[in-house]
Image (spheres, rainbow, N blue to C red):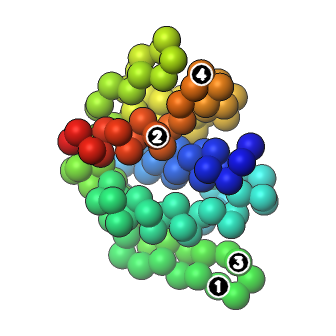
Amino acid sequence: MDNLEQSELVIAKILGLLMEWGLTETEMRFEELGLEEDFRQFFTTCIEWLEAEGIIRVKKVHKFIDGHALIERPTITAHGFRLMGITLSVGQQTTTIGAAVKQTSKDTGFYTGLGDLGGGFVGGLLKSLGSA
């Protein structure tokens, strides 16, 4: 997996957790994503990107010297929930962004299968952002 694909997987895992948690007061740590340590370097950057795009909202991002981070009160925004309902076409498959996120959060192999079909998760998400 290249860096973009790793970033896409981290984003899908973050969104999957937030969809599962709903609108609750919680904290998020990288370890909750269930990914290998190699993915840690993308965690806070992906959080910040999702927030900058208006997909999620966080109270605060705490970055520690050892590379760990704590995300205070992350939630999906109304705009983010709207995006989760948009249809995503990758290759011959059609699904909603939300369904792809949920499936990827359970089965990382589902994500890599989507990527193999000639388009990535973030590519579909970016296209949706442009049309939303």
Q: Is residue 103 left or right of residue 125?
A: right
Q: Which residue is mark 1?
A: 64
Earlier sequence position, callout 2 versus callout 1: 1
The answer to which of 4 and 38 lies nearer the viewer is 4
Three-letter code for the amino acid on which mark 3 is drawn: Gly
Tell me the distance, in whole angstroms, between the alpha carbons under discs 1 and 3: 6 Å
In the image, residue 79 above or below residue 86: below
Give the residue type at disc 2. Answer: Gly
Which disc is residue 117 wearing? 4
Identify the secondary structure beneath mark 1.
Answer: loop
CA gap between label 3 and label 2 equals 27 Å
Three-letter code for the amino acid on which mark 1 is drawn: Phe
Closer to the camera: disc 3 or disc 2?
Answer: 2
Label 2 to label 1, Cα distance in Å?
A: 30 Å
Position in image of residue 7 (x %, y %) = 60, 53
Marks 1 & 3, CB-CB < 8 Å contact: yes
The residue under the point 33% across, 54% down is 55
Number of dots carrying numbers: 4
Residue at 37 percent across and 64 percent down: it is 51
Outermost residue, bottom side: 65
Q: Determine which of the numbered discs, if any, sits on residue 123 in the image.
A: 2
Q: Which residue is mark 3?
A: 67
The quarter of the image holding the C terminus is: top left
- Give residue 40's quadrant in the image: bottom right
Taking the spot 56% from the left edge, 74% from the top edge, the residue there is 70
Residue 18, image x, y percentages:
43, 50
Q: Earlier in the sequence, mark 1 or mark 4?
A: 1
Asked which quadrant contains residue 32, the reply is bottom right
Farthest residue in the right direction? 37
* Disc 2, SS: helix
Residue 8 tag number: none
